[in-house]
Amino acid sequence: MVHQGVNPRASGWSVTAPPRLWADLQQHLFQDDRDEHGAVILAGQADGPRGHRLLARELLIAEDNVDYVAGTIGYRALRPEFVRDAALRARAEQLAYLAVHSHFGTTSVSFSPIDLASHERGYPALRKITKQIVGGLVFTPRAGAGDLWLPDGTRDTLAEVVIPGGNLLRLAPSPVPVEASDARHDRQARLFGDRGQQAFTRMRVAVVGLGGVGSIVTELLARLGVGHLVLIDADTIDETNLPRLIAADLDDVDARKTELAVRNARRANPGTKLTVINEEAQHPDARQAIATCDWIFLAADTNAARHWVDRTVHQYLIPATQAGVKIPVDEAGVIGRIHVAIRQLIPGSGCMWCNGLINPTELALDMLPSHVRQQARYVDDIPAPSVIALNSLAASEAVNHFMLAVTNLHTDSGEHSLLRFPRSGRQICQQSRRDPTCGTCSDHGVLARGTAA
Ligand SMILES: [Zn+2]
Ligand SMILES: [Zn+2]
């Protein structure tokens, strides 16, 4: 019985692979010899906006001529020792076991009858050994399919494979039909295509921090047509915020920042679904909400917000964009190098800890209850300067990156992090550093552990 009549479109399963792991896998699968190649992926698990997600954590490459049974033709069987070692590791680490191989082809791929027969021979026993999900994945460079054997004895197919790099790639077993965009978004669809426009509609996107930058990010995302926004901020509006918050007026003083963001998002796009969290980023409700999104905008400048968003990026393989403005003023009142910073947080690439962007002392203070926090800081926080035109540079740059990534319109799959200096007109592209033994962004730590971390 092939796939037990399950419609692959209806499946709630996906695999997400960090771009670095995907690059290694592609290099191995699609070699110039035009032969089939294989590997095993061990994956964590989490629930996402469209169902269950498998999160690729470790790639075990099957060496050609070493890890295969000699003399097999057409279908190349992995050596029992290789399978056993990988299965025992999956069991010990409580990770899904996914055998991967390549097929020839372009935008469609499916298992051969020989593949499926081997799954039926091997996977029931492997599932017994690992007590985890076991399955097979098959790829062409532009398509991916999967056959999953679940611990409860059922079997399901894979709807898509997601690679959250500079361009957010989604591979399906075959081209997914797309509906024409609505009249409202006609001019956008002329740039993004109907498929690109629809990609926004199906996304759930979090905005952490709804101040000067987050307020504009929310407006832009709603107008682009993002289907679901998760709006997170614990603050209320004071008079000094009014010049920088979209559509704020005097009556909004003392209202919650989330209330204004909701009003703006509804006005910008009545079809957008909204989830509101009136808490700081470190609150469990906020952490849980951002862990089930497709993308996170980090527009809050506390160390706790940085830490928890950064951790979510790597633990759950969810891409994020940090957007901020720095206006340094020294004690004599001299204004320093004003800059707008846009940082892409790419799952499995260098995290904020690796790049010295989280201060452990400040993080410890941020994690105290707010009334204790005030007393614990030595000096009163002097409010930093803040101006809407600078904030809008940061918000636009961040949302532009998101927009081009989601619609695959970036000309390269690089990191696209940058610093811009409006006073001099200069701009610097940045590349994140990565410690290969990091507890956040490497497989020595929480990378792709999902809910089991
Ligand atoms: Zn095959
Ligand atoms: Zn790191």
Image: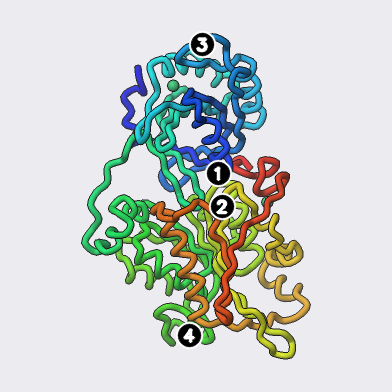
Cα distance between the residues tagged 3 and 4: 71 Å
Sequence-earlier tag: 3 or 4: 3
Cα distance between the residues tagged 1 and 2: 8 Å
The answer to the question of whether label 1 and label 2 lie on touching residues, with beta carbons closer than 8 A, is: yes
Q: Secondary structure at mark 1?
A: loop
Q: Nearer the viewer, residue 209 or 419?
A: 419
Q: Position of residue 409 (x, y in %)?
A: 40, 55
Of tags 4 and 1, the one toward the viewer is 1
Of tags 3 and 1, the one toward the viewer is 3
The three-letter amino acid code for the residue at tag 4 is: Pro
Q: Quadrant of the C terminus?
A: top right
Residue 14 can be seen, yes or no: yes
Cα distance between the residues tagged 3 and 2: 39 Å
Left or right: 84, with 296 as reference point: right
The three-letter amino acid code for the residue at tag 2 is: Ile
Sequence-earlier tag: 3 or 2: 3
Residue with the mark numbered 1:
18
The three-letter amino acid code for the residue at tag 1 is: Pro
- Is residue 351 placed above or below 265 in the rendered structure? above
Of tags 3 and 4, the one toward the viewer is 3
Q: Residues within 10 Å of mark 4 (few under 14, many from 20)?
A: some
* Picture residue at 64% right of the left edge, 16% below the top: 81
Left or right: 452, with 179 as reference point: right
Q: Quadrant of the N terminus?
A: top left
Residue 279 can be seen, yes or no: no
- The image's mark for residue 243 is 4
Residue with the mark numbered 2:
346
